Amino acid sequence: MTNRIILNGTSYFGYNARRSLIDEIKGRGYEKALVVTDKSLLEANVTSKVTELLDEISFAYEVYSDIKPNPNVANVNEGLEILRNSKADFLIAVGGGSVIDTAKCMSIIMTNPEFSDVVSLDGTASTKNPGMPLIALPTTAGTAAEVTINYVITDDERKKKMVCVDPHDIPVVAIIDPSLMDTMPKSLAAATGMDALTHAMEGYITKSAWLMTDMFHKQAMNLIFNNLEKAVNEKDKDAIEAVGYGQYIAGMGFSNVGLGIVHSMAHSLGAYFDTPHGLANALLLPHILRWNGKVCPDRFRDMGREFGLDMDNLTDEEAVNIVADAVDSLARAVGIPKTLKEIGIPYDSLETLADQAINDVCTGGNPREVTKEDILALYKEAYE
């Protein structure tokens, strides 16, 4: 079997790493940027931490900021119109996964116009050209969109979150600057951090996991699990930095091996109810860990050790439960709601959600074979 690893070419890390943007722009000979961000980041003066660098060197740019938390086809089309009219020759994405995913999709269509309907990018599209150059500066510690070959766009007509997988979409530069992350509201920091933990854990037990991705996922679990509570509740700078690195490292792994049904089920919640992706993952994760643990208990022993738990002298069932309980406790400690009912999901929607989730692209990577009935039972378990 041949295993493939695809990573972005250049990344910068550390507080104030965003200043590296100036040298990258100058060195690459770009002339004008479209800055893709969202309105909340503009209002919180987070985007300005990046645009002020462009102002320092009198570099030309325009801004597109009308992006939903779960970006849709309309977002992409609106952004494309602004991008074409701007005459920009590259993109700068300043935001979380929603912003970076939108910029990725725009980037791909600019150089592969045969996919301008957007929906044909669903799944693994046969694009031929690398996207328009994109520099990504994440403001959340969660999705790792700055290093992955994936992006997610909602097709409102089909009520479907399209998981688009394309090596041509990867940003040319990623800048992981914790000073862009440390103003996140507590609820967002918690949800995105739990999203990153989900990436690491699902990536570690997925069917395609192997030596290189195991290395990434184990380190990511260690960093995120042991620092998230301090990052969220205490705004500890070192912990925020550790979680920021952990989410990036998790992205290096899962981008290359896929995920599982936590993501499948979260995608359905996002498509039908606009549930924030990280929140959906965090709420579902403990339930699905216990269910998947039946087929890979040794992997749970490894995960527990990365958490710092004593995994010796445990039965398989005990090993799985202690890890799932630890994740559940962390979710409660950072303020994640416990049930689907609590976040307003109607019980009579669960079967429809299961119909969608079983057909999600992430389902095939799940370590345990799954049916629609299994997914429905898991939704019901998470309901109350």
Image (cartoon, rainbow, N blue to C red):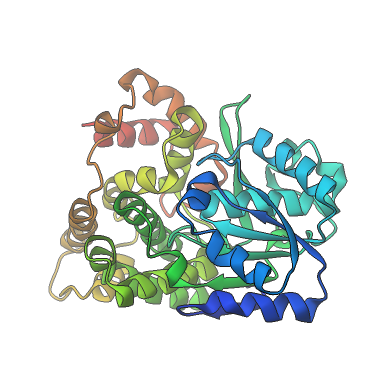
Say which quarter of the image contains residue 318: bottom left
* Image location (x, y in percent) of residue 205: 41, 62
Q: Nearer the viewer, residue 324 or 69?
A: 69
* Image location (x, y in percent) of residue 128: 85, 57
Task: Report the residue at 35% width, 56% height from top.
Answer: 189
Task: Report the residue at 81% width, 42% height from top.
Answer: 115
Task: Report the residue at 31% width, 27% height from top.
Answer: 344
**Residue 257 in view here:** no
Q: Relative to residue 158, is residue 282 drawn left or right?
A: left
* Image location (x, y in percent) of residue 89: 82, 61
In the displayed structure, 143 sits above or below 239; it is: above
Q: Nearer the viewer, residue 265 or 19?
A: 19
Total numbered circles: 0
Q: Nearer the viewer, residue 253 or 331?
A: 331
Q: Of all residues shown, which one is farthest toward the top? A: 348
Q: Of all residues shown, which one is farthest toward the left? A: 313
